[in-house]
Amino acid sequence: MFRRLATSSLAMAAMAVPALSEITPAEVWDQLIAENESVGIELTEGSREEAGDTLTITDAVFSNESATSSMEMTMPKVVLNQTGDGGVRWFLEGDVTGSITEVTPDDTEIVIPFTLSMPVNETVTTGSFEDLTHEYTAETVTVTMEFPVDEGQSAPVPLTITMEGLSGTQRSIEQGAAGGREVDFDGAITRLGFALDANIEEGEGRGAGTAAGEYVMDGLEMTGRFVLAQGVDNLEEQLEEALRGGMEVVLDASYTGGTGSFTFNGTDSDGAPTNGEGSMTAGPGKLSFAMSDEGLTYSADVESSTNTFSNSRMPFPVQYALNAGSFELAIPVLPSDEPAPFTFKSAISGLTVNDEVWALFDPNAQLPRDAADLNIDVAGDLLMTESLLNPPMNPSAPEPSGEAQGGDEATGDDMAGDDMADDGEAMPGMEAMPEPPMPVKVTINDISLKAVGAEAKVQGELTAPEGGTMAEAPVGQITGEFTGIESLMGTLGAMGLIPQEQMMGARMMLSMFARPVEGEPGKLTTELEFRDDGSIFANGQQVK
C-alpha cells in the first residue's frame, strides 16, 4: 500500500541540474500526470488557472484501484512558475490528505487515512518532456497515518513519520514511443523518525493501557533507479507483465545510526497491572532492494546494535548486543522451465547477553560466555513452477477455471461447502496460493556457529536426483568440522542440562556421525554422503 503513496508523491518531491532547454509549467504538470498514469494512478484536477508564467492547480486528486486495494489523495494547491532561465519552480500549498483501503480475504475493508504536510518545499524542473531533471528540497515532511486495530477498538493507532532536511535529484528519461521511462534518483534525509502513541481499549483477550514508541535514523542517503516497461498502463495489475517487459527497480540506502525506545503501561486480560519499556541503538547500516525479471534481491547490514527491554513481571532487564549483523536474499519471482539461482545469507558477529540471562541456566558460570558468531551462506538453483506474484499479491493473475474436475460447471451451491477440494487444492473461485519453489541444487558454502566454547562448520552440496526431487532423496555430500563438542557435552551433563541416563546415548550418536581428527585433540569431523539409491553413509558407514 505504501508503494501507491510513494509513487504518487514521486513527482511532489522531484529533482534537477542546469537547464537543458525551455520548458513550461503546463509541460511539467502534464509530465507528472503521464508518469502517474503509467503506473495506474489517475489524476483529476479540481481547477486549472494560467496567469502569465504561472500555472495554479487546485484540488488535484490522485487515485488508484485494484481488486484488493485502493488509494486516493488530494493536493489542495500546486503552484508552478517559470524561472526565466528555462526551468520551472513549483511547490505545494496546504496539507495533502487521503486514504488507503485494503480488502482482506474475508472481504473486510481496512481504511487507513493519512495526511502529508510539507510547509516549506520547492522543486525546480529543467530539461524537456523527453528528458526531465528535478531538484527538490523540503525543510520538514510529516506523514500521519491511522491504523484500525479491530472491531473492539474504536480509537485507531496513530503513526507519525517525520523527515527533516529532505533533498535530492531525479532524472526522468523517455524510452521509446510506447511510454516507457527510466527514472534515476538520489536523495538525502538528515533525520527520519517514526513515532507511535496509542491508547489501547480493553477487549476480548486483552486489557487496557497505553503504548508509545519511536525510532530515529540519522544521515540517511539514497540512490536508485526505476525503469518502467513500455506499454504498461497499470503497474498494480500488470506487475508480472511489466517485469517481463523490462521493468527494473533498484534502491540503495545507508544511514549513520539509529536510536529507539518504547513503553507500555496498562492491565492484562485479567485486570492485573503490567508495564514495560525498552531501548535500542544501532550503528551505521545499509539497505538494498532490487527487482527485475531476473528476480528479487534484498539485503541489510548493521555495524553494531545494543538492545534492552524489561517487563514488570520479569526479575531483571534483558540486554543483548552484537558487533555486526547482515542479511541477504536473492530469489527468482517469475516462472520458468529452467532453474534460476538463489542466495540466502545471514550473519551475526559478537552476540552477547547480560549475566542475569546466563544465570537462569548457568548460575555457577560453568559455560564460557564469549561472544557468539553465526554465519549462514547458502546458494543454489530453484525451479519456479509458478510466479511469486500470483494471488493474493497480484490481482491480475487468472482465476481458477469454472470447470469442475468432472467437466461440469461449478455452481454456487457446489462451493458453499468446504473451501478446499479433497486433494487440498483451492476450490474454483478461490485465490490459490502459489506453488513453493522447488530446489534442484543447494550449495552450502558455509554454515558455522561459535558459542559456549564450541565451534561447528558445515559445507557441501546436494542436488535433486534425475527424475526426482530433493525432498525425496537428495544426492551429494556434506562435510563438517567440530571443535569442543565433547567438552561441551560433559559440561552440560555436569550442569544437569543433559540427564546422565541420556548422556550415553548422546555420546553414541556423536560417535556414529563424527570421528576424531588425528593429532588434534577435541576436534571431530564428519562426512555425510547421499547416494542415488536413497542410501546415506556417515564416514563410510551406512546409516540408512
Image (spheres, rainbow, N blue to C red):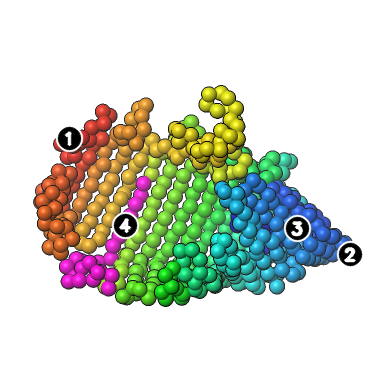
Asked if disc 3 and disc 2 are in contact, CB closer than 8 Å, the reply is: no
189, above or below 394, in the image: below
For the C terminus, the quadrant is: top left
Q: Secondary structure at mark 1?
A: strand
State how far apart marks 3 and 2 are (Cα).
22 Å
Q: Secondary structure at mark 2?
A: strand
Mark 4 and mark 3: Cα distance apart in space = 50 Å
Q: CA distance from mark 2 to mark 4?
A: 65 Å
Left or right, residue 51 beside residue 432: right
**Residue displayed at 33% across by 55% down:** 375
Q: Nearer the viewer, mark 4 or mark 1?
A: 1
Query: Residue 198 placed where, x, y %?
Result: 54, 71
Q: Quadrant of residue 402?
A: top right
- At x 29%, y 42%, the residue is 460
The amino acid type, in three-letter code, at marker 3 is: Val
Where residue 374 is drawn, which disc sits there?
4
- Answer left or right for 285 relative to 313: right
Q: Is residue 342 above or below residue 146?
A: above
Where residue 396 appears, as percent x and y from the top left, is 62, 40
Between marks 1 and 2, how big is the CA–CA gap?
Answer: 88 Å
Query: Type of residue at label 2?
Result: Ala
- Residue that label 2 marks: 51
Q: Earlier in the sequence, mark 1 or mark 2?
A: 2
Q: Residue 500 bears which disc, if any?
A: none
Which residue occupies 67% across, 55% down? 71
Q: Is residue 421 visible?
A: yes
In the image, taking residue 314 as reference, residue 206 lies left or right, namely right
In the rendering, which numbered label is found on residue 61? 3
User: At label 4, which amino acid type do we have?
Assistant: Leu
Q: Residue 542, labelled with which disc?
A: 1
**Foreground pick, 144 / 369:** 144
